[in-house]
Every structure is written in C-alpha cells, then in structure tokens.
C-alpha cells in the first residue's frame, strides 16, 4: 500500500505544506509515498498530474490523502492510476457513496437528521425548494449541498430557524449558492436541525460548536477516533462506538469517515460520512498513531 499526496504548487517534488506532517508520519510508519499535482488534476490534465508516479510491474494498492475532488475527477484519477498498475482503495462508486449524502442516506437514515434533496440546474426553482422545506413544518433546518455546508456562514447561509419562513429560505439558499460558487456539488440538501450538546462558540464565526467526533474506518474497522474540533473542552464525553461499528458494516466503502455528535437527549447521531481519502485529520490528531494503525490494519 502506498500513499499519494498533493505536491506544493511551486515544486512537484515537494509536498503540500498542509500534508507535510502526515507524510512524515506515513513514512515513519513504513509507507512509501508519492506526489501528484492537484492543480493539474483539477484542470483534467491527468497525465501530467501523475507524471512523477511511475508504472508498477505488478498491481499495487494505494490510498490518496489530499484535497477533496469531485466524483468525476476521482474517477479520472482512479482510471489513470490503474493504467500504472496502481489501484486506489475505493472505486469511483465507493468514493461517491460516502462523498454524496444522498448516495448513502438509506444506510444511515435511522441515525442521522431527516434529510431531503434536489439536483440544481442553472435556474433555481424556489417552488421545488419550498416543497422540500415544507416537509419540515415549523422545525429548524440546515442547508448544504451533496457534500459540504457553508457552516462558517451559519446565520446567513446554513441555519434556518423556521422551515416555514420562505423569505429566509430564499435569502439563505441564494447566499449559499453564491458562496459555494463553482465548488457547489450537485444540488441542495435540507436537514432537520437537531439540538446537540454544546461545546463552545467557534472563535471565527457564529457556528455553535458541538461535541463531535470523527471516526476513521478501514475495511469496516475503526482506525482512530478524534475530537472533530480543535477548540473547546470535550471533558470525558465518549460515544458508544458499538452502534456505529455495526452501521459501518453496511457502508459501501473500504476507507471512510463517520462524524458523530450527541443530541441533548443523550442520543448519538451521524452528522455525515466522508471518503477517508479526502477527510481531514483535525490538528489535535496524533498523526503517527493514525498511520501506525493504518499500517497494522493493512498487513
Ligand atoms: N442537522 C443538524 N443539526 C444540528 N447541527 C448540524 C446539523 N447539520 C450540521 N450541523 C452543524 O453544522 C456543522 C457542519 O455540518 P456538516 O454536515 O458536517 O457540513 P460540512 O460538510 O460542511 O462539515 C456540523 O459539524 C454541525 O455542528
Ligand atoms: Mg462536517
């Protein structure tokens, strides 16, 4: 198993500074590492993106650890690496399963906020949007696309106090779409807002932080569990992991993350899943421990 990171924009031989400590930890754990050009990958220039990764004699498995890419780009990368006898840990279908909320929703729906969604076209159809938001009655809801929210613009583009407030929905959806810009993934998702155990106020935005954890699963087994936020006092709050390990068995991915949070009534729920290759490690994460565990679990 090799690990592929993104290079720094300036030098194809140098790792992206944000992943430097990860690469060191991977090497310490005994992994061979490679670099690709994220800029060229995003441009669709796939052959130059992986120019410095040499073709293997025999098929080898690899894991990408880098910035999020859209499903189409992942597929491009996956197929181009296969030509070099390198197979990424998740197929394009497996990547999309955890990357897009609607794709895995049926697997987690009893353990995650009630959600609905629609594809977005060039023209925003607010009547179609209201049909979705009406299903939440007077409840509070949050907006995201199939992958990401604008959580740091909590009041303007994420949280809607009352799902029946059409003016607020219109303003927030417009703001959300404007902020996401070209990064918008597929469409809109609306989710019932759940009252979660409060941790602290985010230092740079109005987002209230809650006691969330990020669990990494490899081949359906837990690699590590991290505090999702780097601020706030988690105290000795610890989730019951048995329930989530059971749910993980149904998820169609070999390497993924599950973010979980605690409701104020004590119940633990899933906030979202993500492909493990593009889910960040929080600053507080012990990266050496993470890569050591990966190594142990792979061989
Ligand atoms: N349905 C919800 N109920 C309560 N809080 C939520 C809900 N959805 C999101 N949040 C809060 O907003 C944050 C961002 O939402 P998330 O779905 O994880 O989007 P992103 O992919 O942008 O991180 C979460 O970490 C959580 O604190
Ligand atoms: Mg999140």
Image (cartoon, rainbow, N blue to C red):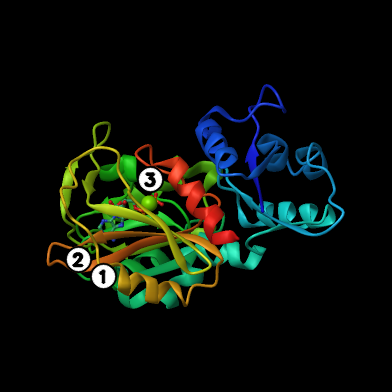
Mark identifier at residue 150 = 3
> Going from the N terminus, do you reach mark 2 or mark 3 first?
2
Q: Secondary structure at mark 1?
A: loop
Mark nearest the camera among 3 and 1 is 3
Q: Is residue 135 above or below residue 35?
A: below
Horizontal side, residue 209 vs residue 10: left or right:
left
Dot 3: element: loop
Q: Are marks 3 and 1 in contact (CB under 8 Å)?
A: no
Q: Position of residue 262 (x, y in %)?
A: 21, 61
> Can you give x and y, in whole percent of width and height, for residue 247 in the image?
39, 75
> Looking at this rendering, what residue extends furthest in the left direction?
265
Q: Residue at x 31, y 66 (%)?
A: 133
Residue on which disc 2 sits: 139
Residue 265 screen position, x and y as percent: 12, 67
Q: Is mark 3 within 8 Å of ligand 1?
A: yes
Label 3 neighbourhood size at 10 Å, few (<14), some (14-19), many (20+)?
many
Which residue does the numbered mark 1 point to in the structure image? 136
Which residue is more in the foreground, 103 or 284?
284
């Amino acid at each position: 198993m090799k690990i592929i990171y993104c290079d720094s924009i300036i030098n194809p031989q140098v790792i992206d500074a944000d992943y430097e400590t990860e690469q060191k930890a991977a090497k310490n754990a005994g992994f061979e590492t490679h670099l690709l050009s994220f800029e060229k990958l995003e441009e669709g220039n796939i052959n130059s993106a992986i120019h410095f990764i040499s073709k293997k004699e025999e098929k080898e498995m690899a894991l990408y650890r880098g910035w999020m890419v859209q499903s189409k780009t992942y597929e491009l990368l996956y197929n181009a690496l296969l030509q070099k006898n390198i197979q990424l840990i998740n197929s394009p279908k497996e990547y999309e399963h955890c990357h897009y909320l609607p794709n895995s929703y049926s697997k987690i729906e009893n353990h995650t906020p009630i959600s609905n969604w629609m594809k977005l076209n060039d023209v925003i159809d607010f009547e179609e949007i209201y049909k979705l938001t009406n299903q939440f009655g007077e409840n509070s809801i949050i907006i995201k696309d199939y992958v990401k929210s604008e959580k740091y613009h909590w009041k303007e583009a994420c949280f809607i106090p009352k799902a029946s407030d059409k003016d607020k929905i219109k303003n927030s959806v417009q703001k959300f779409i404007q902020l996401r810009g070209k990064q918008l993934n597929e469409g809109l998702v609306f989710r019932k807002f759940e009252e979660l155990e409060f941790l602290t106020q985010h230092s740079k935005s109005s987002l209230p932080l809650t006691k969330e954890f990020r669990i990494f699963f490899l081949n359906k087994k837990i690699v590590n569990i991290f505090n999702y936020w780097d601020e706030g006092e988690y105290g000795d709050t610890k989730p019951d992991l048995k329930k989530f390990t059971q749910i993980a068995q149904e998820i169609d991915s070999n390497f993924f993350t599950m973010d979980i949070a605690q409701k104020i009534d004590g119940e633990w729920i899933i906030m979202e899943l993500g492909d493990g290759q593009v889910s960040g490690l929080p600053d507080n994460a012990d990266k050496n421990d993470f890569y050591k565990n990966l190594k142990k679990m792979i061989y």
